[in-house]
Image: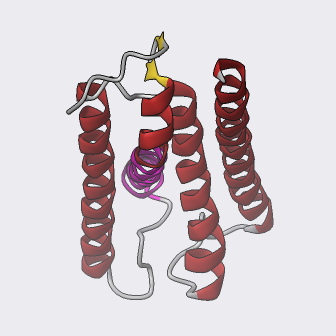
Amino acid sequence: MENNSDRVVSYGNLRNREVFAPRNFWSGLLFGIGMMSFFIGTVFNQLLQWNHFYDLADEKTGVFSDGLMNLFAWIATVTGLFLLSSLRRRNAVWPKRWVGSALMGSGLYLLFDGFVIHKVFGFHQVRYGMDVLPYDIAWNASGGLFLLTGLFLVLQTKKENQRKKKSTN
């Protein structure tokens, strides 16, 4: 790989930023989706035992569906980490962009789970035996907050890169 030494910054150089911006984004996004999925599965499905990923059948099927969800979570997380490792080898990690896309991934997972899994397919609710509206609002609002915060950070990186490119020309 050719050496990109024209304007070194703490996370590579400007050329690395531009070339590897998509990989930074996808690495963070997959990591965020996987980690939020794992967190939700661990806390709500296993520790609190409020639901299973799929509650429309017996307990055994519910536990099996939780296992499939954890498998998906780890595949997404490990894939994101492999991409991150590749970026580190190339001195191309863009921390702000990566964190922003990880937050976006977390928010996307929560919103997908809250709207599609909970409401469209009805696989499960956040909690049973009580009014689910406050839980749904908190769930989807937190997903929106993660998504918007991440989007803000990712858009900032795009503007920063354009500004730095102009100042070097």
- Up-down: is 81 above or below 123? above
Q: Can residue 131 be seen in this view?
A: no
Q: Where is residue 80 drawn, in percent x and y?
A: 33, 46
- 130 vs 31, left or right, is right
- Up-down: is 107 above or below 160? below
In the image shown, does 165 or 22 lie closer to the viewer? 165
**Residue shown at 24%/29% (left/top)?**
2
Q: Where is residue 18 drawn, in percent x and y?
A: 50, 39
Quadrant location of the C terminus in the rendered image: top right
Q: State the image quarter where residue 91 is shown.
A: top left
Q: Where is residue 120 drawn, in percent x and y?
A: 63, 86
- 95 vs 57, left or right, is right
Q: What stretch is highlighted in magenta?
A: 25-49
Q: Is residue 157 visible?
A: yes
Q: State the image quarter where residue 67 is shown.
A: bottom left
In the image shown, does 132 or 32 lie closer to the viewer? 32
Q: Magenta span has 37?
A: yes
**Residue shown at 71%/67% (left/top)?**
130
Residue, far front: 169
Q: Where is residue 34 drawn, in percent x and y?
A: 39, 52
In the image shown, does 114 or 77 lie closer to the viewer? 77
**Residue shown at 67%/39% (left/top)?**
158
Main SS, magenta residues? helix
- 137 vs 83, left or right, is right
Q: Magenta span has 32?
A: yes
Quadrant location of the N terminus in the rendered image: top left
Colouring convention used in this rendered image of the protein = secondary structure
In the image shown, does 162 or 73 lie closer to the viewer? 162
- 147 vs 103, left or right, is right
